[in-house]
């Protein structure tokens, strides 16, 4: 027996889902265009990294749509209660329908849901007995995709070699100056960059918000490096 479709008419939920889909589209289009494909063409990353990103993106949006339209465990209007289980049922004081214990009435959806956890506006649906596993999948793949994107951003700015095909909108004199400087200037390690940003060489202090930042003295050969 297939899973029933459950669609909630809620403008607030539609807005939340629209925002999630916009962020997903932005990451799926922008990150590969700016980071994945250019670094793949220059040999900094393998095709496996590109495919893994798209697989994570695909599983993320698939779990979002499945969790949003899956029936969370809506109770039928006239449930057939076995005689041996009547003691485990109770009357809902909002919709005046019999429901199993641990069920709850959702004011957004307008009905009772078996083992209801909460109503999630980001999927525009309740999280209940029949779609809780889909909601957990969504949380998992969202975390994986977000972490993957952050790692790619970090590698793009602080680990990978600068892209050779970047087009800078500069004057001829600046181009000649940058060309000469790039030849003679050593590449700054990512640890040095983070130490300058956070104001300390102690990496453990990078994660402590209860302190004052002290500017670091930058070595001369790194002074003008961006």
Image (cartoon, rainbow, N blue to C red):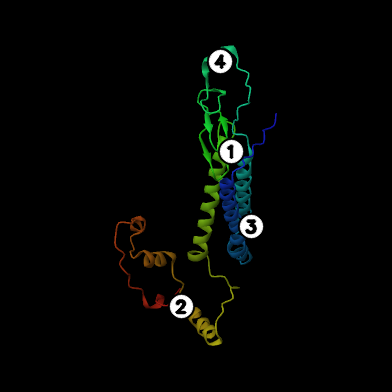
Tag 1 and tag 2, C-beta contact below 8 Å? no
Q: Residue at x 64, y 57 (%)?
A: 47
Residue occupying the point 59% across, 54% down: 24
Element assignment for label 1: helix
What whole-number distance in Å separates the C-alpha atoms at marks 4 and 2? Answer: 78 Å
User: Which residue position is annotated with label 4?
Assistant: 85
Q: Residue 207: image x %, image y %? A: 36, 55
Q: In terms of secondary structure, where does tag 2 sit?
A: loop
Whichever of callouts 1 and 3 sits on the residue coming sooner in the sequence is: 3
Q: CA distance from mark 4 to mark 3?
A: 56 Å
Kindly indicate whether the residue at mark 3 contacts the one at mark 4 (C-beta within 8 angstroms).
Answer: no
Mark sitting earlier along the chain (4/2): 4
Q: Earlier in the sequence, mark 4 or mark 1?
A: 4
Mark 4 and mark 1: span between their CA atoms?
Answer: 28 Å
Residue drawn at the location 60% of the way across and 17% of the way down: 81
Which numbered circle lies on residue 93? none
Q: Residue 130, percent across and down?
A: 59, 32
Frontmost residue, 14 versus 151: 14
Residue closer to the observer: 152 or 74:
74
Toward which corner of the image does residue 127 lie, by quadrant? top right
Labels 4 and 3: the sequence-earlier one: 3
Q: Gap between marks 1 and 3, in whole Å?
A: 29 Å
Q: From the image, tell me which residue sits under label 1.
A: 134
Of marks 1 and 3, the one in the foreground: 1
Q: Nearer the viewer, mark 1 or mark 2?
A: 1
Q: Quadrant of residue 26?
A: bottom right
Of label 1 and label 2, which has the lower sequence position?
A: 1
At x 53% / y 21%, what residue is drawn? 91
Q: Which residue is mark 2?
A: 185
Question: Which residue in the structure is indicated by mark 3?
Answer: 47
């Amino acid at each position: 027996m297939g899973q029933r479709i459950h669609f909630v008419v809620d403008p607030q939920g539609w807005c939340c889902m629209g925002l999630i889909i916009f962020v997903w589209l932005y990451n799926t289009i922008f990150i590969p265009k700016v980071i994945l494909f250019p670094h793949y063409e220059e040999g900094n990353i393998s095709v496996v990294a590109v495919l893994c990103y798209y697989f994570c993106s695909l599983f993320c949006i698939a779990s979002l749509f499945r969790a949003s339209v899956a029936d969370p465990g809506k109770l039928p209007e006239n449930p057939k209660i076995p005689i041996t289980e009547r003691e485990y049922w109770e009357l809902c004081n909002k919709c005046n329908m019999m429901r199993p214990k641990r069920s709850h009435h959702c004011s957004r959806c307008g009905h009772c849901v078996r083992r209801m956890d909460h109503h999630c506006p980001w999927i525009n649906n309740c999280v209940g007995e029949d779609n809780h596993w889909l909601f957990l999948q969504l949380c998992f793949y969202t975390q994986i995709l977000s972490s993957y994107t952050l790692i790619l951003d970090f590698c793009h700015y602080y680990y990978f070699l600068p892209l050779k095909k970047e087009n800078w909108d500069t004057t001829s004199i600046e181009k000649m100056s940058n060309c000469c400087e790039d030849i003679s200037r050593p590449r700054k390690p990512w640890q040095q960059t983070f130490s300058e940003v956070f104001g300390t060489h102690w990496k453990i202090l990078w994660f402590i918000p209860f302190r004052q930042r002290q500017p670091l003295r930058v070595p001369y050969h790194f002074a003008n490096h961006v």
